[in-house]
Image: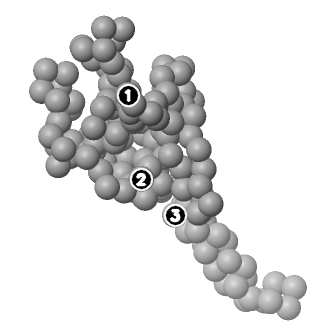
Amino acid sequence: MLFGGQRCFSFLNFSVTVFLVLNAIEQVEHITVNYTVWFPNVDNVTISGINTLVTLQENSSFYEVVIKAAKQNDNFTFHATESVLNRHAVTSINGMESVIGPDRVYWFLYKLDTYPDLDNTPAVNYLLETGVDDTIVSDGDNYLFWLTHH
């Protein structure tokens, strides 16, 4: 069947293609990550923690988790420096800063098998060797940012 010198099938095929592309865009997979922050109390002996769940797209970096958590909850505001290679280093969370010098207190990032337990601090082998930009998160992951001495 001809329509204006063109076959209707061509028009219908274009519509189906657009529908399939739009439908594929809408089916973006999302994951949920557990994000916990530990920091020393005033006595510098005991620690306290805050926690949130962050839902974001698959293949997101941990830096994207930090950004989304800060948008969701004021307790997760942060400051990060950016290096020449566009890599970020988190230097403060909720106003608590890393300390360079004799006291050397830094934000350390851990990936844990389970939810963090204040009574059972994580071993060094859970400490990540990659930075926030190079750590790609997966559904159900448990991350801990801990302001501590090492």
Marks 2 and 1, the one that precedes in the sequence: 1
List the residue tagged with mark 2.
131
Q: Secondary structure at mark 1?
A: loop
Considering every residue shown, the one lying at the far right of the view is 4
Q: Amino acid at mark 3?
A: Ala
Q: Residue at x 29, y 51 (%)?
A: 128
Q: Is residue 104 above or below residue 140?
A: above
Q: Nearer the viewer, mark 2 or mark 1?
A: 1
Quadrant that contains the N terminus: bottom right
Marks 3 and 2, the one that precedes in the sequence: 3
Q: Is residue 149 above or below residue 124?
A: above
Q: Amino acid at mark 1?
A: Asp
| Mark 3 to mark 1 CA distance (whole Å) | 52 Å
Q: Nearer the viewer, mark 3 or mark 2?
A: 2
Q: Secondary structure at mark 3?
A: helix
Q: Residue at x 59, y 44 (%)?
A: 81
Image x and y of residue 150, in percent: 27, 37
List the residue tagged with mark 1.
103
Give the mark count: 3
Q: Residues within 10 Å of mark 2 (few under 14, many from 20)?
A: some
Q: Secondary structure at mark 2?
A: loop
Q: Amino acid at mark 2?
A: Gly
| Mark 2 to mark 1 CA distance (whole Å) | 22 Å
State the mark number for residue 24: 3
The one of 23 and 33 positioned closer to us in this rendering: 33
Image x and y of residue 40, in percent: 33, 18
Q: Residues within 10 Å of mark 3 (few under 14, many from 20)?
A: few
| Mark 3 to mark 2 CA distance (whole Å) | 31 Å
Image x and y of residue 95, in percent: 53, 21
